[in-house]
Image (cartoon, rainbow, N blue to C red):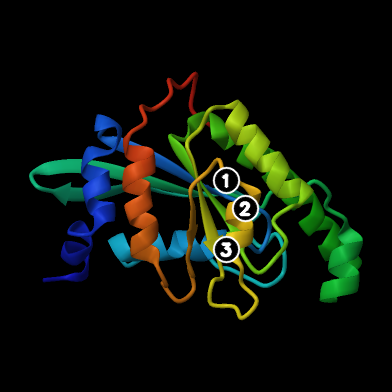
Amino acid sequence: MGLVDRIKETTFGKWLSVSFGKKHVKIGIYGPPNAGKTTLANRIVRDWTGDIMGSASEIPHETRRARCKSDIVINNGGSTLTLDVIDTPGIATKIDFHDFVENYGMGEDEAKRRSKEATEGVIEAIRWLGDVDGVILVMDCAEDPFTQVNITILGNLEARKLPVLIAANKIDLENASPATIKSAFPQHPVVPVSALTGYNIEGLYGTMVRHFGRRRPKKRAGAAA
């Protein structure tokens, strides 16, 4: 049995077969910079296709344009589903080019360009919220979850009534504390994972079945550009 065939038998595969009763599912991966969004997107996409979403970096705002892997065709039990995964730029309330110069050794011109593109990326990420069926919100569980960014993102998602699942990422770090995230945001399911090592990814998929599967998709006013 090949890798894709094995994945089809996972709870994620079963979720895809029943989610929303639809043939097309769009899941946006959101979060602050360097929370591990692209690493998680890469793991999901690689599992299904052997491909990756894009490159990750320790420098904030490596992803400055939304990236989408579309038309990932899943055949399961005679049914065919198409999965779109959208890896969005990191959400930030402030982007200052001086941070790139002082903390990452960039030249001023490069830092200004990165800052401008990152700001545009935040706007694009918010626009994509009008075209997704659910959101996996990635938080670094080794960091304090009570940040303006996390609270702003959740407020936006709740206002739009989008199903939200919090992936408490980087559980492999010594100072990780997913319990702190659970205490901070008890209104949403929180799943501790390591997108880097694959720890508890099956647990994440199982929660997706229970959380997203019982909700109907919202009606879309239009697709994102």
* Residue 12 image position (x, y, % from top left): 29, 53
Q: Is residue 125 visible?
A: yes
Give the amino acid at mark 1. Pro
State how far apart marks 1 and 3 are (Cα).
12 Å
Q: Please say if the residues under marks 2 and 1 sit with CB atoms less than 8 Å apart.
A: yes
> Label 3: how many residues lie within 10 Å, few (<14), some (14-19) or many (20+)?
many
Question: Which quadrant would residue 32 be assigned to in this image?
Answer: bottom right
Q: Can the viewer see residue 45 in this picture?
A: no
- Would residue 2 appear left or right of 165 to someone viewing this image? left
**Residue in the image at 61% along x and 72% along y:** 176
Of the numbered discs 2 and 3, the one sitting upstream in the chain is 3
Give the residue drawn at x 17%, y 42%.
Answer: 80
Residue designated by label 2: 183
Q: Residue furthest left?
A: 78
Residue position marked by numbered label 1 in the rendering? 186
Residue sitting at x 32%, y 54%: 206
Quarter containing the C terminus: top right
Give SS at disc 3: helix
Q: Nearer the viewer, residue 109 or 195?
A: 195
Residue type at numbered disc 3 = Pro
